[in-house]
Image (spheres, grey):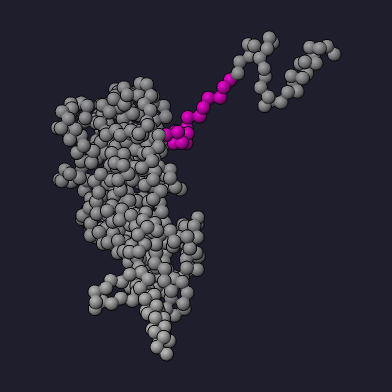
């Protein structure tokens, strides 16, 4: 066997993981580099993060677990308290699996009160009155805001394709929209002149042509009017624009400013508009309803290019406007991403919602701090706080403040029972002496001096 054949046999037996060194025989060999994946998951991982909104999401996740535990405990028939041993059994039912019952009570003393049962003499716990009062106040405010609840449901129905919405979608967003737990009976069935039950799980808006023009105006229109009047911008620049707030550290790629400027000027069908004066086909100018447009977009979105009369961009911009309006109707201007998917059929959305949200980081922000992804409306928040708070948000924020206090300022939490059990220092209030630490030693020393005097006299 020749020397060249031996060398070639050694090269063949080299493992595939060992890179070939370039030499005179393989200097022209081309190596194909794997193209990096550009998917929604990679864009979600590589996005510019907002630490304030991420921290707020983590805090609200803890508060949600505490509220779930309160619902579980309050539903018991034996009373609003339970033993510490039973707490370790009930906590997993509320989703609390990463912390023990003892650590939970020590970590949040402003929410939990630990006491000894008067009969069984075992350690028990209950929720403090301040936390329970805030929860009851939130329920009262939610039940009293019937007009706002009717307005929110009505606006969502006006944005729908056929004027109908499935109740399970509203039920999933009940907390975010500020609706009461029995909103089906207390709102939809009660206001039968506005809503009508088509099926057991489908509600319909009776009259979509309302005389009140405020119901057909999106929240963003007030921002556009302000930009037009105060900043003296042209109507061409403002009429279809959205407020853009990029996070700190966001890198703008070359050429993206011009694309964003053109996208801001691109006209679209607004959420409450039902008739369209343009068509995907440039040769057709007749009006068409939202259902026919939705069907055409569903069938043609895969084949129509982005240059075809701007049809796909306009439709995506309409979806952005719909999601923007839904977030504006919520209490905290934030919604879990997976729950928005339940509105796709009713609102005529045929695109991937998460990919669309990631394409517009200046309008929306997706936080992944927790099990569920939460989308925030950027323009509504500043440094982790809502710019325009409401009563429900203020109450939830007060509950969150109790959670964030941790084990600080615990001296204010002493109950009357604990104050009575505390040993009191000996004082002489008649002579105006103030109680001081260590005064209990004085009578003991005086007794010793009395004994010494008696011994001396004897």
Query: Compared to 7, does 191 lie above or below?
Result: below
Q: Which residues are magenta?
A: 32-47
Q: Quadrant of the N terminus?
A: top right
Residue 292 picture quarter: top left
37 magenta-colored: yes
Residue positioned 24% across, 78% down in the render: 430
126 magenta-colored: no
Viewer-closest of 247 and 39? 247
Residue 189 picture quarter: bottom left
Q: Position of residue 438 (x, y in %)?
A: 37, 71
Q: Does any portion of residue 182 appear in the rendered image?
A: no
Please identify the dominant SS of the magenta region. Answer: loop
Residue positioned 32% across, 24% down in the render: 257
Residue 375 picture quarter: top left
Q: Position of residue 426 (x, y in %)?
A: 33, 76
> How many badges with numbers are in the image?
0
Q: Position of residue 310 (x, y in %)?
A: 32, 25
Residue positioned 43% across, 58% down in the render: 107
């Amino acid at each position: 066997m020749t020397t060249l054949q031996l060398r070639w046999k050694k090269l063949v037996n080299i493992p595939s993981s060992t890179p070939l060194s370039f030499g005179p025989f393989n200097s022209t060999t081309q190596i194909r580099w794997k193209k990096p994946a550009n998917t929604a998951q990679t864009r979600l991982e590589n996005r510019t993060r907002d630490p304030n909104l991420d921290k707020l999401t983590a805090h609200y996740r803890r508060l949600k677990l505490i509220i779930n535990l309160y619902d579980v405990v309050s539903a018991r028939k034996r009373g609003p308290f339970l033993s510490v041993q039973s707490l370790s059994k009930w906590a997993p039912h509320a989703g609390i699996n990463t912390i023990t019952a003892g650590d939970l009570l020590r970590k949040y003393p402003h929410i939990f009160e630990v006491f000894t049962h008067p009969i069984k003499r075992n350690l028990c716990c209950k929720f403090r009155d301040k936390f329970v009062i805030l929860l009851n106040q939130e329920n009262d405010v939610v039940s009293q805001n019937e007009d706002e609840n009717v307005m929110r449901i009505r606006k969502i129905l006006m944005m729908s394709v056929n004027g109908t919405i499935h109740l399970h979608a509203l039920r999933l967003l009940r907390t975010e929209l500020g609706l009461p737990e029995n909103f089906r009976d207390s709102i939809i069935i009660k206001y039968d002149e506005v809503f009508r039950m088509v099926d057991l799980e489908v509600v319909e808006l009776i009259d979509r042509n309302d005389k009140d023009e405020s119901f057909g105006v999106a929240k963003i229109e007030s921002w556009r009017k302000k930009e037009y009047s105060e900043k003296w911008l042209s109507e061409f620049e403002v009429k279809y624009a959205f407020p853009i707030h990029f996070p700190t550290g966001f890198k703008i790629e070359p050429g993206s400013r011009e694309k964003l400027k053109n996208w801001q000027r691109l006209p679209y069908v607004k959420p409450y508009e039902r008739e369209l004066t343009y068509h995907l086909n440039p040769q057709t100018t007749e009006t068409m309803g939202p259902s026919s447009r939705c069907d055409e977009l569903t069938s043609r979105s895969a084949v129509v290019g982005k240059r075809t009369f701007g049809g796909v961009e306009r439709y995506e911009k309409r979806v952005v406007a719909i999601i923007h309006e839904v977030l504006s109707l919520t209490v905290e201007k934030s919604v879990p991403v997976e729950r928005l998917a339940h509105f796709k059929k009713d609102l005529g959305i045929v695109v991937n919602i998460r990919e669309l949200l990631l394409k517009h980081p200046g309008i929306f922000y997706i936080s992944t701090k927790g099990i569920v992804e939460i989308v925030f409306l950027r323009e509504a928040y500043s440094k982790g706080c809502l710019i325009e708070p409401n009563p429900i948000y203020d109450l939830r924020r007060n509950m969150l403040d109790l959670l964030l206090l941790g084990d600080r300022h615990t001296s204010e939490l002493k109950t009357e029972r604990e104050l009575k059990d505390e040993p009191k220092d000996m004082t002489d209030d008649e002579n105006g002496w103030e109680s001081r630490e260590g005064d209990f030693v004085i009578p003991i020393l005086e007794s010793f001096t009395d004994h010494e005097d008696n011994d001396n006299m004897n």
